[in-house]
Amino acid sequence: MLRSRLFAIVLPVLVVGGLLSCGWLWLRFYTRHNVTMRVPDLKGLSFAEAGTMLEARQLRALVIDSVYTDELPKGSIVEQDPIAGVDVKPGRKVYLVLNASEPKMIDMPRLVDLSKRQAISVLEIIGLKVKELQYRPDPCVDCVIAQLYNGAPIAADARIRRGEAITLVLGSGDKGQRVPVPDLIGLTNAEVQMVLNMASLNLGVVVECETCNTSADSTLARVRRQSPAANANDRIALGSTIDIWLTADTAGLKPAAGWNDPNRYQGTDTVENAE
C-alpha cells in the first residue's frame, strides 16, 4: 500500500520533470542557443555584394529606404541595422538603406525678399546648397533680390534636385557697404563656408592642402593661411573672395574664440566710413 502511494506521488513528478527537460532541450535546439553570427560592415557595398556576404553568414538583406549622397557610389549601402560587429541569431534580417541613383526632386522655395540668413536657413533645411553670394546695388543690404541656378533665374516651385547649389543675389546698399575680413585660421573647409556665408563673403581658391593624401585628410584639414589676412581695421566689399591654404597637420591650429557667433559678422561700413 505504501509503495503504491509513493509511486503515485513520484510518477507525476518524474513525468513533469521529463517533459520540462525535453521542452528545454527542444527550445535550445529551435533557438540555436549559443549559435550567433556577426554582422559584417556593409557600408559602401552594392546590394548584390551585401546580399552575398549576408547569405554566407545565414543572414538576410532587406531594403527599407533610400537616400541620396554624393559621398558613396550609387546603389551602395548607406546605413544598416543591426550595425556592423553585432552578434545575432542565424536567419536574422539586416535592414539596409541604399544610396539612390538620383537625388530626390524638390520644389524650389521663394527666397526673394528674405534676408540672407533666412534664405540660407531655408536652403539648408530642404537640402540645397549655397553656391555663391553675389551683390548688386539695392537699398536693402543682405536682402535676396534674385535667386539663380546655373547662372539663370529659377522660379519658386520649379522642380530641382536635392543637393544642387543656388546663387543668392543680395542687396549691397546704396553706398558700397564693406565688411571686416573674418579670421579663418584653424577652421575646417566646412566651417569656412559657414563663416563666409555669415560674413557676406565668398570662398575664392583653395590654394593648397598641405600633407592631404586622402579625401578624409582634406575633410579634416584646417586653414593655416588666408588672403587677405584678417585685420580688424581692414574692410572689403560685400561678396569679395578669400583664398585659403589648408593643412592636414592640425597640431596647434585652433579657431578664434566665438568664431561661430553670427553677431560678430553683422557689422558693415560704407566706403566713406571705411576710408
Image: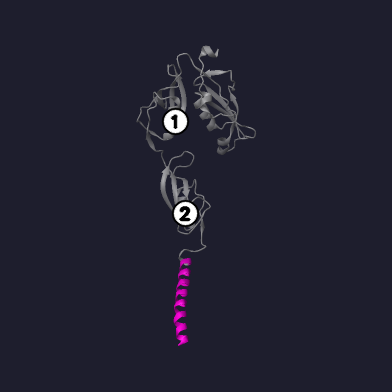
Give the CA distance from mark 2 to mark 1.
42 Å
Q: Please state if 236 lies on the left or on the right of 104 as rendered.
A: right
Q: Which amino acid type is marked by label 1?
A: Ser
Q: Secondary structure at mark 2?
A: helix
Residue 272, relative to residue 267: is it above or below?
A: above
Is 71 magenta? The answer is no
Is 14 magenta? The answer is yes
Residue at numbered disc 2: 52
**Occupied quadrant, residue 170:** top left
Q: Secondary structure at mark 1?
A: helix
Residue at numbered disc 1: 121
Find residue 98 and report its horizontal and vertical position in percent.
44, 45
Binning the other alpha carbons within 10 Å of mark 2 as few (below 14), some (14 to 19) or many (20 upward) gives some
Find residue 16 and report its horizontal and vertical position in percent.
45, 74
What segment carries the magenta color? 1-28
Q: Main SS type for the magenta part?
A: helix
Residue 59, relative to residue 254: is it above or below?
A: below
Q: Nearer the viewer, residue 158 or 111?
A: 111
